[in-house]
Amino acid sequence: MIKKNVALPYILLAPALLLFTLFVVAPVFQAAIFSLYKWNGLGPLSDFRGIDNFVLLLKNAIFIKAISHNVIIIVVSLAVELPLALIVALIIGRSEFRLAVLFRTFFFLPYVLSEIITGVLWQFIYHPQYGLIRSIFENLFPGIPAPTLLGNPATVLGAILVVIIWKYFGFHMSILIAGLQGIPNDIREAALIDGATSMQTTGYIILPLLRPTIIVSAYFSIIGSLQIFDVIWAMGKGDPVNAAESMVTYLYKFGMQRLNIGFGSAVAVTIFVFCLFFSLIYNRLTATPEER
């Protein structure tokens, strides 16, 4: 009888656990400690403030505005981006769809671009003097000046939302296509043979089987929306007048640039709590009955 080495799994996991502790767990606890002090990042931690940083944060109108913007991004991602990705995945994920690989590549390419490149690219597109928007207005609406989408507080967030959908649409589509490929074709064929229409097969069979994949895609969308920074920063740093401020751009402005590390750490801890909350919901939804 072969003896099992009980210590072997722990030995193999030790390097990964060590790195995870050093670069994930330790920084979280360190930020939690910094958030209790007024500290500029230099010298010892001596000015203890307790929860004052959190009280000031929750009373700050700009931060509350930033939270509302993150909520808007989440809602748009779940209500617009994911349904569009699901519809396209159902269309081009079918084995009989021609040029499926070409369409998948076409939709996935924006996700390959870095966030900074994406932001700079769309800055040129939105530019009212020499961008694509100006060309469209010159040809379709002669005499009407192109709108300054990124310079108007009323339109800047909407303009950034278009970019977010454009960039991450292909990512969610690819996840959903992978989920569809895991559903046996026999199930679909059996339903069609029994007289079910394509719509009935999709609504009563495919979508319920695709539910775990949809939950994963929604989870990535929510966490990504809470942590979004690069695209917004590259397209105007959350301005004008904080009209597109997110929690992370707020953290960078009021924590890092102003060297208010204690206050910035309070922002970081708040973002962590939001992410942890949605992660616990995700774990609850995906847990088996035995794990609950």
Image (spheres, rainbow, N blue to C red):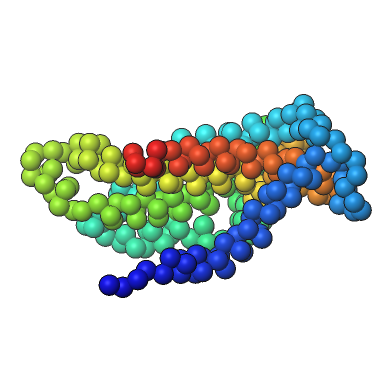
In the image, residue 286 above or below residue 26: above
Residue at position x 36%, y 63% in the image: 102
Where residue 101 appears, x then y in whole percent?
34, 63
Query: The N terminus is located in which quarter?
Result: bottom left
**Residue placed farthest to the left in the image?**
194
Residue at position x 75%, y 40% in the image: 266
Residue at position x 55%, y 66% in the image: 14
Q: Is residue 266 left or right of residue 161?
A: right
Where residue 80 appears, x then y in whole percent?
46, 38
In-front residue for pair 143/99: 99
In the image, residue 1 above or below residue 246: below
Where residue 143 appears, x then y in whole percent?
65, 39
Query: The C terminus is located in which quarter?
Result: top left
Q: Is residue 261 left or right of residue 107?
A: right
Q: Is residue 251 visible?
A: no
Q: Is residue 217 left or right of residue 223?
A: left
Residue 3 picture quarter: bottom left
Where residue 13 appears, x then y in whole percent?
51, 65
Residue 209 picture quarter: top left
Q: Is residue 89 visible?
A: yes
